[in-house]
Image (tube, grey):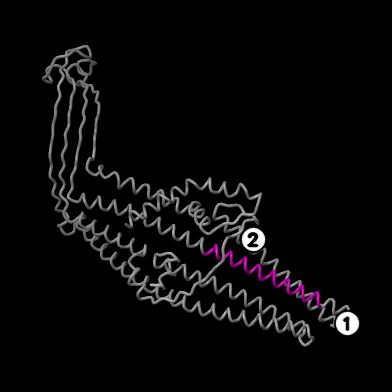
């Protein structure tokens, strides 16, 4: 099932590459007419199609697939047709070298050699595993691209929300400044209060300008990875909606550990190493060949039917030969020979691959445990950040009311406004961190975020 699934995904990836030009054209063509909204699904498709690493992985898959489908070449080793034209005569003996057409010879030869090795099934299996390994490599690279695009997509949405917070902070600062301006004209506030409110507006405007520049730069970089030119009219669809995920790592390890791509790939490494040992342990060769030879030569040198060629009498003759050879290698069992050393090296490779599997499994278990703990702690951070925002909103509302009543100074109101803006930024950062951890945990289990969320209902 895994092989069919990966193969179908690879085919879909190739189809996506072929359709990329049309997709980008359809996307860019109407940009001048109206703002465009980019969804996460569209962004992932574009990123996969644009990824150079995936394109190179596709080439490797094609090569491995060709090798896996060309197993017949391991049996039919050689087909050799040949033509020969030769001339021979004395050089120093007799009358010396003289050109005589009768000494010319013409021949044709064709042969087929077939080799059977008892290790052939292992060879074919190794070729099949190499193909499956390339599929897993492609799948792993594709998921990494999609995961990074998802993280960046929602990071840009967080940037957009931060930009909205800066705009609200500027509106509040301008509102406060307008009240102080009117109050200053009527002599109700001091010039210092008036100047502080004016400075607050300019500071909020500077913060907004910096956030706009940062958002534009980040969007330009993000769209570039999708193969799109930056356009301020392009917006991202959706909002980051979080669900609390509180999971016990041990059941997750038991259920999902051995479907991780890194473990599947390491299992294939072990299988290939074991097959290599079987190949080298005892692999007799059975070779069969058939050859047909036909040619002409001077009369008297060959027996056959007389013919006339080269201006002299010649003979035509042909020959059909066949042979069967059984080769039993024993070098593998002789200590110190290169074949024996190769067999020992192959056995060592198996042992090291199994040790590497233990390392991969231990790292995977620790990663899942660490991510579940970090996810739980990150949710606590979100709850604290939300409480901070709630308190900051109430504090600002009370300070604004007190300012209107003349019991709160402009400086205190501005500090409370800045505290509210900072609390909102911290909440956005905590939410993005939590979602990134969800992505990491889903990737560690080799499932989607939707599946990760649904686990809680099980």
Residue underneath mark 1: 187
Name the quarter where the N terminus is drawn.
Answer: bottom left
Q: Let me know if residue 152 is in the magenta part.
A: yes
440 left or right, relative to 36: left
> Looking at the rendering, in which quadrant would you find the C terminus?
bottom left
Task: Label 1: state its secondary structure.
Answer: loop
Main secondary structure type of the part rendered in magenta:
helix
Numbered tag placed on residue 79 in the rendering: none
Give the extent of the magenta segment. 151-179
Residue 81 x/y as whole percent: 24, 30
| Residue, far front | 457
Whether 116 is drawn above or below 196: the answer is above
The image shows residue 243 at horizontal and vertical percentages of 49, 72
Instruction: Decide: is 109 above or below 191.
Output: above
Residue bearing the label numbered 2: 216
As rendered, which of 115 and 5 lies closer to the eye?
5
Q: Residue farthest to the bottom?
A: 407
Magenta stretch holds residue 223: no
Do residues under tags 2 and 1 come within 8 Å of each other at their CB atoms? no
Residue name at image x 37 percent, y 70 percent: 364
Who comes first in sequence, dot 2 or dot 1? 1
Check disc 2 and report its element: helix, strand or loop.
Answer: helix
Q: CA distance from mark 2 to mark 1?
A: 43 Å
Residue depicted at 37% across the width and 55% down the height: 6
Can residue 287 be seen in the rendering of this structure? Answer: yes
- Between disc 2 and disc 1, the foreground one is 1
Depth check, front residue: 312 or 303: 303
**Callout 1: 10 Å neighbours few (<14), some, many (20+)?**
few
């Amino acid at each position: 099932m895994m092989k069919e699934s990966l193969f179908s995904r690879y085919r879909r990836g190739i189809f996506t590459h072929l359709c990329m030009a049309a997709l980008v054209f359809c996307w860019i063509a109407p940009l001048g007419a109206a703002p465009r909204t980019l969804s996460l699904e569209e962004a992932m498709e574009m990123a996969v199609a644009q990824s150079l690493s995936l394109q190179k992985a596709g080439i490797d898959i094609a090569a491995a697939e060709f090798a896996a489908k060309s197993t017949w070449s391991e049996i039919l080793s050689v087909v050799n047709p040949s033509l020969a034209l030769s001339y021979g005569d004395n050089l120093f003996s007799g009358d010396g070298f003289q050109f005589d057409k009768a000494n010319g010879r013409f021949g044709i030869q064709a042969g087929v050699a077939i080799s059977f090795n008892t290790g052939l099934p292992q060879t074919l299996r190794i070729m099949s595993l190499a193909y499956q390994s390339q599929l897993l490599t492609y799948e792993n690279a594709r998921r990494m691209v999609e995961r990074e695009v998802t993280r960046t997509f929602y990071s840009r949405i967080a940037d957009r929300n931060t930009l909205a917070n800066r705009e609200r902070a500027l509106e509040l600062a301008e509102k406060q400044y307008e009240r102080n301006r009117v109050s200053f004209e009527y002599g109700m506030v001091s010039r210092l209060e008036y100047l502080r409110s004016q400075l607050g507006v300019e500071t909020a405007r500077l913060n907004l300008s910096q956030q706009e520049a940062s958002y534009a730069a980040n969007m330009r970089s993000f769209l570039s990875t999708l193969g799109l030119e930056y356009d301020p009219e392009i917006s991202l669809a959706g909002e980051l909606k979080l669900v609390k995920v509180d999971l016990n790592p041990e059941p997750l390890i038991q259920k999902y550990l051995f479907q991780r791509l890194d473990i599947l790939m390491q299992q294939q490494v072990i299988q290939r190493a074991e097959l290599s040992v079987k190949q080298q342990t005892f692999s007799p060769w059975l070779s069969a060949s058939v050859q047909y030879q036909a040619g002409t030569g001077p009369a008297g040198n060959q027996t056959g039917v007389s013919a006339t060629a080269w201006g002299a009498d010649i003979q035509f003759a042909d020959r059909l030969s066949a042979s069967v050879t059984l080769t039993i290698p024993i070098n593998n069992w002789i200590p110190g020979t290169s074949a024996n050393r190769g067999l020992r090296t192959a056995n060592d490779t198996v042992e090291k691959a199994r040790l590497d599997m233990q390392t991969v499994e231990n790292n995977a278990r620790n990663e899942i445990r660490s991510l579940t703990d970090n996810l739980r702690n990150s949710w606590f951070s979100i709850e604290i950040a939300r409480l901070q925002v709630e308190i900051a909103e109430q504090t600002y509302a009370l300070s604004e009311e007190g300012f209107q009543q003349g019991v709160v100074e402009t400086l205190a109101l501005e500090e409370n406004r800045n505290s509210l803006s900072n609390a909102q930024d911290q909440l956005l950062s905590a939410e993005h961190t939590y979602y990134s951890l969800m992505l990491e945990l889903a990737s560690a289990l080799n499932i989607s975020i939707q599946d990760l969320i649904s686990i809680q209902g099980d």
